[in-house]
Amino acid sequence: MDTFSAILSEYTSLAKTDPLHTWILFENTSLANTAIQKLREEGAILKDHITTVKGLAKSILATLSPATRIIDPEEQHLLFARIGSDVFGKKRITDTQTENLVNLFITLKTNKLVLPEGEDKFNDFREIFSRYEEFCRENDCCDSILAIEKAAEIASEMEIGTVLCYALYKPTPLAVDLLLALPGTIITRPPVTEIPGLPETCRGVFQYTDTRTELRSALESIAALIESGVPPKDIALLTPSLPSALPLLDELVPDFSVLIGGTRRPLGFFAGEDIPIENLPPVRCALAWLAAFAFDCRIDDLKIIIESPYFALKKDWLTAGRLEKAGIITKTEKGRAAWRTVAERLAAARKKEIGEHDAAFQASLDRLLDRLDANLEHAGTLAGHCRALKADLSALGWTKIQMKPQDEAARHAFLRLLDKLALTSLAEVSYTIREFYAMLSRFCEKTTKISYPESKNAFFAGDLRSVAGTKRPYVFITGLSANRIPRIEAAIPLLNAQETARIQPDRVQNLLDASRYYFHAAGLAAEKQLILSCAGHDGEKSLTPSPYLTRLAEPEEKSPGFLAHSMTANQTKAGELLAAGRENECEGLFGIPSLETAAEIIGIETVDRTGTPGIYDAEFAGDEIAEAFAAAYTEKTEFAPTVLERYRECPFKWYLTDHLRLENPADFSAERIIVGTVMHKAMERFFREYTSPLTEENESDAAEFLKKLVTEEFKNRHIETPSWQSMLNGYLGNGGLESSCDLIIQLETGFYAAGFRTLPEWLEQKVTAEIPGGDPFTVSGWVDRVMFNEQTRAFAVVDYKTGNVKTWKELEEGSALQIPLYTEAVRQMTNYSPLPGTYLKIAPDEVKDKNPYLVRGKQQKSVEEVGDAAFAFCRETREMMKAGKCGGVSGETCPDDYCPYKRICRFVPFREEEA
């Protein structure tokens, strides 16, 4: 058993008998997270007890000094900037100066160093640090470094049984103080610090011509290992400087793929280094919005805004290309006033009147400028700037639009950053909008980051520290050039080398020892195979191998050869073979576009668009592709009712959304759509959390309880527009309005009086109905709620609506499927008698029980008859799907004026009739 597995086993054994008082400390967060993942596979754990020295300090303060607030790096930076400007007698100091002050403070504190006496600059530094610590004491707060110092003072009061310290390489003096202050038993497992020679697992030491070739060769080897059956999680690609390698990995990895089970899958990786959010698309757009306001509408910022898919702007003729062209012709690069007259100046330059398109362009640009100036202010408090930017982003749809997981994580991190800044101790300090922009940009680059998404189908990329003391079967260490390792910073920030040597004479030697240790630890991590490599050039300058590498072995010059798993290499190889007349040798290559496929695409795009609808119109019934539809929808035996309803509304919309699975552009209109989700959540919470009987006596209490839930759910959306507040007022009854919450509770007390009860297990419950007749299949979905009457053994399905409600006509025709199918599903699951299901309209301006089975109070058909109509529709729709009938619903008009697919719709209103 390796030492990492052994320490985890030891921790597990101790934690079984004393879980609350057993801790295990690792050198860095990456190792702690690895340990947490492994221990979770064996059972429940106390995550906070598997941590670092910093994490332990925070836990001690949380237990023994819960009033102490741990300040974030952003607030620390702002405090140092403000104190530093006061001490230096300046209005502001630069971000670089502030960052150097913070780093100097951290270095002095962690190493328990003292600045030399007698020089003015050292006196200034001492004054800044003294004021900062005084502020922290007076406000009972501390940063992560001061937290260690404070925790050491009170650690003896902490109930601790055993602390396992695994491979802590030379803990700082401050960390040692905390460890020595801990009660209980301290068990240390020291790290292995030297490799006597080249490890037995080493299979090669190579030097490539350049860094791209080096990384591509490593990726080819990794792809080959995965294709041979090695789990990706068993593979680590390490480098001394991960931040510089990540952009290149992001570029190169997507070019590689592996063939597994007859299917080619893209190569993927996850990284131990977090990603700064500054350049991720949604954050770049948000910062561009702020920059456009702050810097008088620079053209580059406006172009980002206009092109952004995350902003709901009515742009009409306004495009980034037209704006750029207009800027070139009129020599406009920025300026609100200049942009307001750009169409007029365009017309003058062309010696023409303002045309219709230019007028529309100007109108759209004016609307954008108006919107830009709606909330933001050129000067204001930090909290005020944060609120205004959040209000803008909400109004633009940025906070609500569906995003990819990484972009969603970046958006969440950016909003959390704004929330944190608005709550700091400097929230009411005034800043200009440009200072606010500079602040946000720096924090998005330096302190606000998101994790690479982990995946079982991705290999690990990390720095040398990230695997120290652990084991991986296959390890590739790249980038071993002399400029990367050892990389020594001889001077402490704001001090020169001589001043540094006076207060920390062993600094250089300690850094050399640490870099050598982490290199050796990374090499020892390989269980089966270790590959070491360096490059001769980085694209700008020549490189030499690291002395740490050459001490083990002289690198062998290496050429990668044919990269069989690279699409680019395969395509290049195919070109060479075709040029040489050896096309028969292309069979084993991949990524080569088929000429036949290209011809089919061209055929579709040049097809005759007159006469009988055909493949161009997505009517595939007469084409070979119909076989694919028949196979797909014969094999598919479970459908969602909304998918079947969408087909009824428009087969072409269904074809794009559900068959091709194209991303449906988000609806920016907004808040009335979001309010549906909010009220669904509020109603679910009400029936889970309100435990008193819904009698008339409790009606007032129940209404107040619902209002509290609705208020919480509205606030959780962080929307601050007048229309959003207006809807909340409608539910609460503010401003003299009739409260929708009161009316909802009146309906519910009526249901309760009639004997209906709602059980928690029948809230947001997934149900499945078997569709009788023909090939068996099912329709499944999530029912909002089911009410049961135990006395009559009857039930009724409830569907909440804040918008339009399906009518009896749609129910009769079988195109309103949810209520009848959910009713049948519940009947099949419970054997209770079905009653007509109902829509509960719970809008801010209307509350009503809208039962679609009733017309003027009279039930039109039985539940069974309506159910039969729904079954028939389901069967008919599935058969049409199998036949490939995907054309538009009408040859005359489109029923949806706001369809998101209008630009690619095959509806052709001017189609000619066949002669």
Image: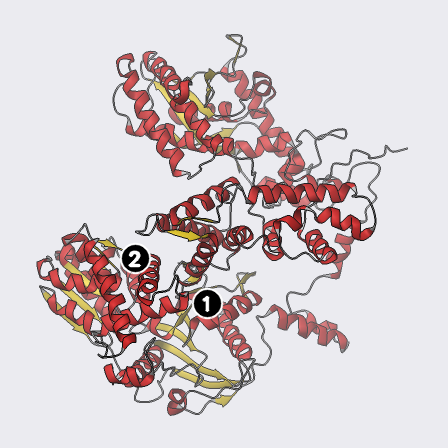
Give x and y (percent) for residue 14.
Answer: 15, 61
Tell me the quadrant of the picture where the N terminus can be found: bottom left
* Horizontal side, residue 696 vs residue 188: left or right: right
Q: How many marks?
A: 2
- From the viewer's perspective, is residue 641 above or below residue 270? above
Decide: few, some or many residues near mark 2? Use Cα within 10 Å; few <14, some 14-19, many ≥20.
few
The disc label shown at residue 229, or none: 1
Give x and y (percent) for residue 599.
Answer: 77, 56
Q: Residue 782 occupies which quadrant of the picture?
A: top left
Q: Residue at x 87, y 33 (%)?
A: 914
The disc label shown at residue 244, or none: none
* Horizontal side, residue 580 vs residue 15: left or right: right
- From the viewer's perspective, is residue 206 above or below residue 590? below
User: Mark 1 belongs to which amino acid?
Assistant: Gly
SS assignment at label 1: loop
Foreground disc of the pair 2, 1: 2
The disc label shown at residue 41, or none: 2
Decide: few, some or many residues near mark 1? Use Cα within 10 Å; few <14, some 14-19, many ≥20.
few
> Which residue appears farthest toward the right when viewing the image?
915
- From the viewer's perspective, is residue 233 above or below residue 679? below
Residue 167 visible in the displayed image: no
Labels 2 and 1 touching (C-beta < 8 A): no
Tell me the quadrant of the picture where the C terminus can be found: top right
User: Mark 2 belongs to which amino acid?
Assistant: Glu
Give x and y (percent) for residue 385.
Answer: 43, 47
* Horizontal side, residue 810 vs residue 531: left or right: right
Q: Residue at x 66, y 35 (%)?
A: 651
- From the viewer's perspective, is residue 807 above or below residue 568? above
Q: Residue 315 occupies which quadrant of the picture?
A: top right
* Nearer the observer, 797 or 721: 721
* Nearer the observer, 375 or 43: 375
